[in-house]
Amino acid sequence: MFNEVYDVIVVGAGHAGSEAAAAAANMGSKTLLITMNLQNIAQMSCNPAMGGIAKGQIVREIDALGGYSGIISDTSAIQFKMLNKSKGPAMWSPRVQSDRMRFAEDWRLMLEGTKNLDFYQEMVSSLIVENHKVVGVKTSLGVEVRGKSVVLTNGTFLNGLIHIGDKNFGGGRAGERAATGITEQLITLGFESGRMKTGTPPRVDGRSLDFSKMVEQPGDVNPEKFSYLDSTKPLTKQRSCHMSYTSEKVHDLLREGFDRSPMFNGRIQSLGPRYCPSIEDKINRFADKDRHQLFVEPEGWNTVEYYINGFSTSLPEDVQFKALRSVVGFENVKFFRPGYAIEYDYFPPTQLKHTLETKLVSGLYFAGQINGTTGYEEAASQGLMAGINASLKVSEKDPFTLQRDEAYIGVLIDDLITKGTEEPYRMFTSRAEYRTLLRQDNADIRLTPKGHALGLASEKRLIRMEEKFSASDKFVQFFKDTSVTTSEANPVLEAKDSAPIKQQGKMHKLFARPNITIDDMRKMESVEGYIQEHNLDEEVIQQAEIQVKYAGYIAKEKLNADKLNRLENIKIPSGFDYSKLQSMSLEAREKLKKIQPVTISQASRISGVSPSDISVLLVYMGR
């Protein structure tokens, strides 16, 4: 194998690396996935779950494009929840609790069944770069592997340093060694690097917990699934999670160890994830709170190991243990492994193009935590996009990018490239200005045609999407075309305290009322008759309901997106000399020169570039 020249070499086999390798190989590129330990492919290093607020939308987008994360999430799920159902559909976010061991196993078997993909277990210590172009990698044993492109997905392994109280040791994850050499080489090539941190809570023995003292959190009564494919099925049985709370006593016990905490004594100075703080950070920042929620999550169908979500910590093990034993239901808790913090190298993502290729070295791509993100889903989506673009570049085809109005993935990458990040970046629905367009229910309609054109999404996927779109469109038209009498409509309306109609009218007008649901409409004989006659499934029915009830919001967002896309179509010439725009602010010139946006729209989103700076740029370009 070492005599071969690979099209794509993927370094690291976490969520980003696994999606990158699968995408490149499925697009026909000869691909090598190289990682330090093949037993840990797609390891869930932190919580055993996929999806959540905005993250669930990303998983559905990955699936719609032809990635594997949605399928694996379904096959390894032990619980399903659709979060935010009390809010509008733009906020609905699917989440699964996963069987940690099955998740990794299913990913490995999926990858082993992928054509054009080879595997190799070793640590990559350096890149082979010639004339500002990557041409391969070199391992710690001195083995050289040649490749036309390289995707780095190193996670937390680059010079990783694990902290537990006043102890620290090198490692990329507990029980695994750190990766060295790559950071130092990239810096000599001109890259800027930084340090970030993240943390993880203790894992405990479920047999030592008293669940009767906790609040049970079951899955949805009628669970859905992630993948749009028929090959995965919704869960028929589920495992419950549980919830308990910290207390003032717990907080006091934790405070006793603050002087031994690396976060407070100065040994860790890098920034951690703002929206997933450690328990000591929560106690410090929210001193007015007398308790915090702890989610007790099973690690799988059969294991007794539990993950204590909300108790992420780097405090000494004895402090963790004493404090946790004061939590209700944890009085007799036994540890499997303590929580810890980990510091690692990352590279500010403003050094990348929107394809995730580096600006300094041709053919070199970064994806995942190396770009300053946090979360499996964010990493997986970047891996997918990097794998796609590495394959396209080798094939000398046009690159593939997603706009902000096309996908959360587009928002994620655009935020990273144009704004950068100094703390671990996490996706939220609030980051997407077009979230009414970017719902989890329509990710297949938005992206499957694109995935199919790339050669990732199968013909079967495309046909299924087209059938769903056509069926929901016809159902919406049915409501627009069909009239309803007062005698049929008013009993339904009165039952919902909605004003009765005085004369016959179109169903669409009734259905558009905020308090009238599809279940109300189905009480009308002609509606239920249409559903039965056309054998409509819940996915189609739900899609039609959203299209009817949110038509005005959707149309408004599309109009706004179209206005923005006019600026997206105004290209900035490559290598544009911003220094000659003396009427533009100095900060704007420096930022534009550093980031090198491709379009006027991208330039407008760079921090420090004002509307007046954009006006100067437009005038200079004859606009």
Image (cartoon, helix red, strand yellow):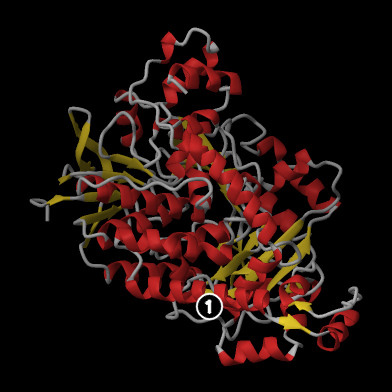
Camera-side residue of 78 and 173: 78
Disc 1 secondary structure class: helix
Residue pictured at 54% horizontal, 79% vertical: 302
Above or below: residue 153 compared with residue 580: below
Q: Is residue 575 left or right of residue 421?
A: left
Residue 353 sits in which quadrant?
A: top left
Query: In which quadrant of the rendered image does the N terminus lie?
Result: bottom left
**Residue 221: percent from the left, percent from the top?**
69, 81
Residue pictured at 79% horizontal, 53% vertical: 250
Q: How many marks?
A: 1
Above or below: residue 411 compared with residue 96: above
Residue 30 sits in which quadrant?
A: bottom left
Camera-side residue of 154 and 433: 433
Residue 448 sits in which quadrant?
A: bottom left
Q: Which residue is mark 1?
A: 471
Is residue 163 at all visible to an observer of this figure? Answer: no
**Residue 107: percent from the left, percent from the top?**
38, 67
Above or below: residue 393 compared with residue 52: above
- Going by the numbered disc 1, the residue's amino acid type is Ala
Camera-side residue of 398 and 122: 398
Residue pictured at 27% horizontal, 63% vertical: 26
**Residue 256: percent from the left, percent from the top?**
76, 42
Camera-side residue of 598 and 361: 598
**Residue 323: percent from the left, percent from the top?**
74, 54
Q: Residues within 10 Å of mark 1 (few under 14, many from 20)?
A: many
Above or below: residue 448 compared with residue 319: below
